[in-house]
Image: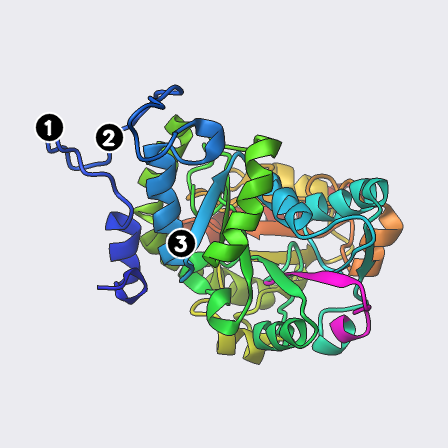
Amino acid sequence: MNNTKKGLNTICTHVGEIEDKQFKGAVSPLYMSSSYAFEDVDQKRYPRYFNTPNQEGLSIKIAALEHAESALIFGSGMAAVSTSLMAFLRAGDHVVLQQTLYGGTYNLATQAFDKYGISYSFTEGWTLADFEAKVQENTKVIYIETPSNPLLTITDLKGISKLAKKNGIVSMIDNTFASPVNQNPIDYGIDIVIHSATKYMGGHSDICAGAVAASSKHIDQIYQLAKNFGGSLSDYTVWLLERSIKTMGLRVKAQNENAQRMAEYLQGNEDIARVYYPGLTSHPDHELAKSQMHGFGGMLSFELNETLDVKQFRKSLKMIKSSMSLAGVESTVISPAETSHAGMSAAVRAAQGIKDGLIRFSVGIEEIEDLIFDIEQALKKVRSRQAITT
């Protein structure tokens, strides 16, 4: 049976696993060797070549999850992003980048591309017309992120795919926020799918990794650069990541449900000024999200009323952690202006709609009643403190 025809949880659990032929263990054995034979072997294995047994097995699993022909595992999400972009860009080329974008990718473009003679344009928004307006004769890549970090904007996958193919451009997407559980961009014609595997694939806040899935042709082009850039992942972390992906389908679906209920609760709370979540019918891209996503994800963002102290609110949370990353089984909040998008100027953040008081909320798998209770007690504490000071 074709891997893409298997059920999601079956792929997560079984595809790409390594058979323990010696002891018949239930999980993939871990091959820790960094040195393999070179004589009388089918291929020369080396960790930096992305072809150790554990690396190969996990790549097969991720390719199956993204309905791709092939995949590569990297040491971080940014290693995956930077290697993929540089594999298709050279001096004199141009890339179109979505306006609402992860801060690390934004920094890569603004701090590195000029050094290598690569020009770039950020779109004014995230509609198809915004991308069409930025395409040039020398455009080689269109890079999108949907849902975007941190405002959860939604970009039309089919539209971008058609635009790219019409102009002979490679299309890339950061699919981290959706995860393969909620969105498979290759089904809509996108060429290259990138993940910070640190997030939903890892899912336990204890792994740093990246992944790229695409056609065999595109992966080979990325690989030729990747093996020289040296962004490979240690086999122990590869093994941990494979273990984590086994429960990804179950985790993400639970997070989807919690995030939907949390977004609805926050939207109805008088202390909350605005909620960003594509699962809400009030979201401007809700219908588009419904058409290309299997679930709306575990990420949302919100803003408190201006009268409330955002930092005091975060510090008053007891169970929900203020934490740098996202997508773990535990619920966390961050300030994008202070973390993921701190490298942007205040003016650029403002242009993207990222206010200093914006809170990005990664919803975990806890009981929703407990999460709501934590938010309620934090809001009550902030209101009480402000009442005293005024």
The crowding category of the residue bearing disc 1, from other C-alpha atoms within 10 Å (few below 14, some 14 to 19, many at least 20), is few
Marked residue nearer the N-terminal end (1 or 3):
1
Q: Kindly identify which residue carries mark 2.
A: 29
Q: Indicate left or right for 344 with 87 as reference.
A: right
Q: Position of residue 143 (x, y in %)?
A: 67, 59
Residues 288 and 136: in front is: 136
Judged from this view, the residue extending furthest toward the right is 347
What residue is disc 3 on? 63
**Numbered disc 3: secondary structure:** helix
The residue at the far left in this view is 23
Q: Are the two marked residues, 2 and 1, in contact with CB atoms closer than 8 angstroms?
A: yes
Q: Secondary structure at mark 2?
A: loop
Q: Residue at x 62, y 75 (%)?
A: 285
Q: Quadrant of the N terminus?
A: bottom left
Tell me whether circle 1 and circle 3 mark residues in contact (CB < 8 Å).
Answer: no
Q: Residues within 10 Å of mark 3 (few under 14, many from 20)?
A: many
Residue drawn 60% across the image and 63% down it = 146
Towards the viewer: 13 or 191: 191
Separation of residues labelled 3 and 2 (CA atoms): 20 Å
Cα distance, mark 1 to mark 3? 28 Å
Label 3 or label 2, whichever comes before in sequence order: 2
